[in-house]
Amino acid sequence: MYSKIIGTGSYLPEKILTNHDLERMVDTSDEWIRTRTGIIQRHIAADGQMASDLALEASRRAISAAGIQAQDIDLIILATTTPDMIFPSTACILQDKLGISGGPAFDVQAVCSGFIYALATADMFVSSGKCRNALVVGTEVYSRILDWTDRTTCVLFGDGAGAVVLTQSSQPGILSSHLHAKGSYNKVLAAPGNICGGKIQGSPFITMEGNTVFKFAVKVLEEAVSEAITANNLQVSDIDWLIPHQANIRIIKSTAQKLEIPMEKVVITVDQHGNTSAASVPLALDIAARDGRIKSDHCVLLEGVGGGFTWGSVLLRW
Ligand code: ACO
């Protein structure tokens, strides 16, 4: 038995923050942001709009696209770095908002690789017959953990959510998944603060060694693509669509160039969404599925890299 994606959905908050808006907030320019990152604009959650709210909208759309009812979902795995609260998990809060109960619901914390980790985990539940219909979500409100006076980080990220419904299938859907981590890089990209005795200890904002992240991301994303292709006895030319984590257009282009994947086969949303961390891959997948780029039987490779460091890929037949 296999697992197969039968519906996708996504949601972006209404408010758009452009590079020109950022020019009025910090010492930056549209030209610097575009040329270094490819980002033109990003969406920002409204006051009080939490990761579970974004997830709910994306999930409703995915469930509707799958042609099932929320009651048919018997597993929720939700990837986020910006949970509604320390506990309970945002997956449990989402389950309540969807008006369902009973099946397992839990969060996965793998930062920008979170959706890849969540989908790989859900595949194991569904393809082994333990669950029938899994809801897999990536949702983020990074605007909450950005220092809006730090130009080196605040221009990079945005808020959003994406979701898929994964169901049992006799035909191959997910072909393989490959997950990795290198914990010794935990300080390179972090939001290192914590709460102790009712007070925040350390910085609650994102800290990042941009150049190290850049080099590491290009290296492991290339390896992740090669690993997935080799494991399935495929050639690079067999990949119809590459859907990478949308951190930075230069990381995406460098990876595609090294692998000789033409950019026409790469789904790009970073220009419109910025880096939405765990939401970026399901957001891009939903957009390419809905606008008809991804067609039945296409071979689609999802890949991600993020804090931890974590990285990985999921190869699937649409
Ligand atoms: N606007 C204007 N100038 C800026 C800005 C800004 N927003 N940010 C930094 N600068 C300045 C720096 O202060 C520096 O000035 P200086 O030379 O006077 O000291 C100059 O620009 C160059 O800074 P660098 O950090 O060397 O710029 P670089 O070309 O490396 O680009 C960037 C920085 C875009 C962050 C790049 O390193 C990068 O893309 N790294 C990957 C980071 C990433 O994608 N993180 C996302 C999270 S991780 C993930 O999702 C995989």
Image (tube, grey):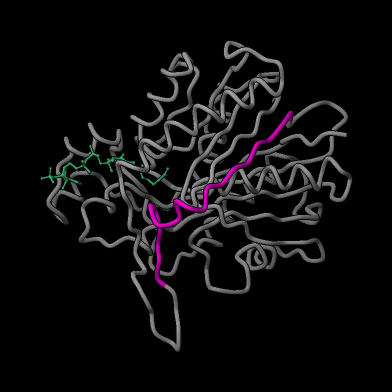
Classify 47 as above or below 232: below
Considering only vertical position in the picture, is 40 above or below 307? above
Q: Position of residue 239 (x, y in %)?
A: 60, 17
Q: Residue at x 32, y 49 (%)?
A: 16
Q: Quadrant of the C terminus?
A: top right
Q: Position of residue 302 (x, y in %)?
A: 58, 32
Name the residue at 36% across, 49% down.
Answer: 157
Quadrant containing ligand 1 reads top left
120 left or right of 222 in image: right
Would residue 263 be counted in the magenta stretch? no
Q: Nearer the viewer, residue 250 or 169?
A: 250
Q: Give the extent of the magenta segment.
A: 175-193
Residue 93: where, in percent of width, then height? 63, 68
Q: Is residue 143 above or below residue 212?
A: below
What residue is drawn where x is 50% and y is 18%?
265
Q: Residue furthest front?
A: 184
- The image quadrant that residue 149 belongs to is bottom left
Which residue is depicted at the point 52% across and 68% down? 84
| Residue 185 within the magenta-colored segment of the rendering | yes
Q: Quadrant of residue 224?
A: top right
| Residue 255 against residue 125 in the figure, above or below | above
Total labels: the figure holds 0
x and y percent of residue 12 in the render? 45, 48
**Left or right: where 44 falls relative to 66:** left
- Choose between 282 and 218: the one closer to the eye: 218
Q: Which image quadrant: the N terminus? A: top right
